[in-house]
Amino acid sequence: TYVMTVTANDADDSTTANGMVRYRIVTQTPQSPSQNMFTINSETGDIVTVAAGLDREKVQQYIVIVQATDMEGNLNYGLSNTATAIIMVTDVNDNPPEFTTSTYSGEVPENRVEVVVANLTVMDRDQPHSPNWNAIYRIISGDPSGHFTVRTDPVTNEGMVTVVKAVDYEMNRAFMLTVMVSNQAPLASGIQMSFQSTAGVTISVTDVNEAPYFPTNHKLIRLEEGVPTGTVLTTFSAVDPDRFMQQAVRYSKLSDPANWLNINATNGQITTAAVLDRESDYIKNNVYEATFLAADNGIPPASGTGTLQIYLIDINDNAPELLPKEAQICEKPNLNVINITAADADIDPNVGPFVFELPSVPSAVRKNWTITRLNGDYAQLSLRIMYLEAGVYDVPIIVTDSGNPPLYNTSIIKVKVCPCDENGDCTTIGAVAAAGLGTGAIIAILICIIILLTMVLLFVVWMKRREKERHTKQLLIDPEDDVRDNILKYDEEGGGEEDQDYDLSQLQQPETMDHVLNKTPGVRRVDERPIGAEPQYPIRPVIPHPGDIGDFINEGLRAADNDPTAPPYDSLLVFDYEGSGSTAGSVSSLNSSSSGDQDYDYLNDWGPRFKKLADMYGGGEED
């Protein structure tokens, strides 16, 4: 078999012996299985195999030293050179994969999928991670239902037995699988599969507690609505798939929107807990749906659900209702009529055609009104008499359905009778009149509204006038002579003493008494001190110290209290202008004391306004 070609170049003339090159193999490494596995054409340099036995699994590479000699290969006279030829032995699939053992085993819980049950190990001497080495596994027997498959691990080339379809312990407790392994590439010519390319796999199934299930889910039953409470409807029982476990199944309600049903906890018998009504809001397309739970007592416990659907057959248990409830009509006939119909919660054949009729009592109903049948579902209500006074009338109408037995209902329709225009429409005045108010009542209401508005207007005018008089009212007496407690509003006081230009000398005590002594005897202002012996009042220092103000005030207070010439008149004792920004504290804690007895009997001569003060101070010892 041709392997490769080596070429040597000689600069001498190739037509002479000096340029004629010949080749030969000097050495071969390794020399296995023989030392002469290759030969070379001496003239062309082609290397070919000359012996069988190349085996990549034993020798993957050969190193061959090739010598090139000119002078037509004469080693004695020619010149030589050597080169190295590296020959790689390529792999062929001449080794079938073989299981490392003939039997494998595994275990799987029932009802589990995508679980690796067992790992199958193989050996293949071909080149790893090549098609000649990659294994393919196939189950050839023992799994007719296809519960398992064997997948190849791309790294280790192992076979992973995996559950792809849940197994049932009650159906199969164990599986005996036969698995065969092969390569992606076919075996080389003349190579046969090994008996070790097949192995047996034993898989045991373990039992687990399975949930009970309802064989018929959803279960549909049919019955008439209105069956009495306590009626047995059906038995909705579940099956426990764990046949080899002695377990009890108990039942309970999971969903019962209207709370109409009961279920026996031990046998699943379903009875009614209330009257089933097809017209209920819980009914969808005549079907009532409830869900029940079946649970076993296994470890751990398991449960399953089942749905019961009850198709309710309609019975005639609802009387028809008249429509519309309100209407209007002209007070004269032949202008318009009222179309009436009925609504029934039942379904066919317990609905229309309906029968509409007027009751015989009271007699005024049939006297004033008449009903004309249009078809099975509609009729017309109109006036029988030529004129009916405007107003609202309650017209009773008996409506009967076609059920078996038929049901009837007396419904009231409120009819507004009103004057109409030429088009048969109620006029505005007619609509008011039809509301039940006559002309006199309407006029009385309008008069009351006008009177109410007038009273409100007069009250507002009176309030404004009173407010104006309050601002413009003048005092009838001089404020200096008025001894009553009055609040007199003068004007805005301004921002304080510091921003006003006042003559502060008016607040100070005069230095001389000439203006008092020169007055006519007997004429004296009540706010001036009487002429007499002057008490020794303290003299305020020119530059007072803030801390001496309290002492100064106390000394002046004691001097005023001990002044025998002080009359009992109510006047202001002026000390001096204190200035602004005083740092002195409050004088509200200073108490006035009085020594000696004084006569307050003159208070009785001041009139009734001072009677209370006279009783307090002028009563003598008995008071």
Image: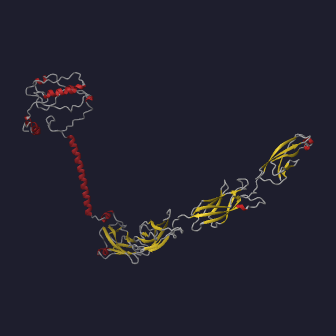
Judge whether 617 appears above or below 289 on screen.
above
Side of 290 relative to 185 (left or right): left
Determine which quarter of the picture holds residue 595: top left
Residue found at x 7% / y 35%: 601
As rendered, which of 366 and 206 lies closer to the eye?
206
Count of all numbered marks drawn on residues in the image: 0
At which x and y percent is residue 536?
14, 23
Residue found at x 73% / y 61%: 194
Judge whether 286 appears above or below 95 on screen.
below
Judge whether 608 appears above or below 568 on screen.
below
Q: How is the image coloured?
A: secondary structure
Q: Quadrant of the C terminus?
A: top left
At which x and y percent is residue 175?
62, 65
Determine which quarter of the picture holds residue 144: bottom right
As rendered, which of 116 and 472 lies closer to the eye?
116
Asked if residue 502 shows in the view, the reply is yes
Judge whether 494 appears above or below 301 on screen.
above
As rendered, which of 451 and 340 lies closer to the eye?
340
Determine which quarter of the picture holds residue 385: bottom left
Q: Residue furthest right?
A: 16
At which x and y percent is residue 16?
93, 42
Side of 411 relative to 478 (left or right): right
At which x and y percent is residue 119?
64, 58
Asked if residue 302 shows in the view, the reply is no
Side of 352 relative to 102 (left or right): left
As rendered, which of 289 and 417 lies closer to the eye?
289
